[in-house]
Image: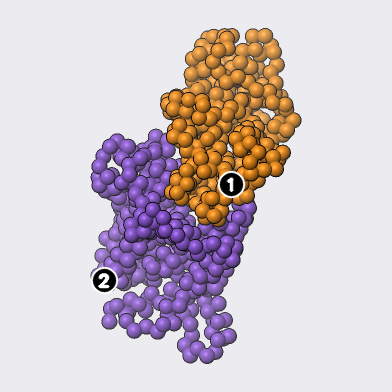
Chain colours: A orange, B purple
Amino acid sequence: MKLLNLLALSVSALTVMGSGAMAQSGLEGMTIGFSQIGSESGWRAAETSVTRQQAEEWGVNLQFSDAQQRQENQIRAIRSFIAQDVDAILLAPVVATGWEEVLSEAKDAEIPVVLLDRGIEGPEDLYLTSVASDQVLEGRVAGEWLVDAVAGEDCRVVELQGTVGSSPAINRKQGFEEAIAGADNIEIVRSQTGDFTRAQGKQVMEGFLRAENGGADICALYAHNDDMAVGAIQAISEAGLTPGEDILVVSIDAVPDIFTAIAAGEANATVELTPNMAGPAFEALAAYLNDGVEPEKFIITESRLYTAEDDPEGEAERRRGLGY
Amino acid sequence: MSRPLRSFIKPQFIALALILLLNWILFPGFFNLFFRDGRLYGSLIDVLNRGAPVAILAIGMTAVIATRGIDLSVGAVMAIAGAVAATMVGDGHPLFLVIMAALAAGLVCGLWNGSLVALLGLQPIIATLILMVAGRGIAQTITEGFIVTFNDPGLIFMGSGSILGLPTPIIIMVTLAALATAAFRLTALGLFVEAIGVNRSASTYAGLRSRALLIGVYTFAGFCAAISGIIAAADIRGADANNVGLWLELDAILAVVIGGTSLMGGRFSIPMSVVGALIIQAMNTGILVSGFPPEFNLLVKAALIIVILVVQSPLAGRIWYFIAPSRKRPPPSSPAETPATSTEGTLK
């Protein structure tokens, strides 16, 4: 994940359109293996279903393998893909290390490998490209929204961090701080970890509300993921305040439940961590396999902001269908 | 029951008072209480309310540990009970049935643990480890991996409603602790449990139905875990099978130990385990209102726990004996001695 941090600083944001209107041809009839980590979160399940959808749109024969959180299962899956002589391999690596051997085998077999969502440590020539979100950018988009939303008025922000030491927590914090660095009217007054869970998000928010004059001194909440925001929204309501009005709520991930909250006016904005990692991967593969175009080493997905103006009910409905 | 007043002054109460005092120094508004919408609010209420799930787990855990056992599965059982409650209420079943089903799930889990320990003779730590791992998987299967949310006001009331101005979890915790203490201490049940903890074979030869009793205490622990699980799900209006109750078994064991119950079995105190859980929660709430950076959370917690356990240790008791020579009787070498005496008191 150090890699992601690095790329965030060094690579200028090369955003790739999410999906939809582009000509999706060039991979018809090809067989592509996909080694997925598992289905540990709603987002992961959505990534799997979006990848399947994308494969259908591109006319790709997708060989799916669920590793159930084990690297040895992923290595076995990749070896089996090599044995089947697939045209390309998508890999969402469960850990960052230990991939040299099996990826060298894929390289020897001249099968391009595209990393999804997470990076690996090791020589960059082991894989064609890596598609991932820029977590610092996600934080920055959330921060920029807040700077616009308060429009120069003083704002005391409380922050619900992710799990201490995890890369999304570090990067999303950094991005948000970068975005508000220029705005002297915005200040993070309290920051605690909510471990990315609803229950902790609620409990920590209760603490913030007590400590900040019953919540009267808090102008906005920034949560590193939507689940913590959903928990915090309940704490705010139970404290007799109106979430979304008395305290602005901005978070990251764009899961269905936050859209339900945005539709109810209880949350204000969320930044999408897109589950569509496969779309950009297929685009890069199509260009590479057909025309030999080497893609950028790091493809950054779009970090789109959603507010009440973006049809939150419809988004909630659409996303529930993806398996979130 | 004429006991000297001194025996009511336990190190746990001093520890709790000190931590609350520390919280007050770090955050002057800590003891502020206010009444709104028919409910009391404030940090002290938060301590009781947020401490309730662990305290309820600790009540069941106390009984298990008193038999020289341990139950690592309570966190996973919470997840199962929450998952059952959330999915059933989502399917439109009546509240009574939903709660009964969730409690029944906890009882079945406890029965499973108890059977492995009492009938198959597995080590409790291994027997309950099975359900600790598998239980979360069962819960995830029930919820199909999603966070199952609900809006049923009756079920939500279990987590964030209030009775007589106090949040429901506090009322449930106090009621359960009182009933359990009465059941164990006003009957010979407590003594039986302690006898099994001291020497199971001897107890069996003395005529105790130790198998049935062992199954009983694990089932009780499962029941308590199910109550906790319902509260935790009701609190966030959803069953989060991946995270609910995660590592709470360790907090519950810690609460029991802080409460002075011996891990070697044979002596226990349910009310002191509840106090132990409140000490842990007072630390958590204190960390939240103090504004320390989160990187220090675990460090602060660990340091405080070390201090509490050292203060309660037999060594500290002996040192206290020497520096306070005015006391005629040696102070309790460990805080858990008193529950044993209280049993004698009730038997007389």
What is the x, y in percent for residue B211?
29, 61
Cα separation between marks 1 and 2: 51 Å
What is the x, y in percent for residue B296?
62, 55
Secondary structure state at the residue bearing disc 1: strand
Q: Nearer the viewer, residue A322 or A285?
A: A322
Secondary structure state at the residue bearing disc 2: loop
Residue depicted at 42% across the width and 45% down the height: B236
Is any part of residue A227 visible from this angle?
Answer: no
Q: Which mark is residue A27?
A: none
Residue depicted at 31% across the width and 40% down the height: B89
On screen, B336 above or below B239?
A: below
| Chain of the residue under the numbered disc 1 shown in the image | A
Is any part of residue A52 visible from this angle?
Answer: yes
Image quarter for residue B216? Answer: bottom left
Q: Amino acid at mark 2?
A: Thr
Number of marks in the image? 2
On screen, B91 above or below B296?
A: above
What is the x, y in percent for residue B108?
30, 49
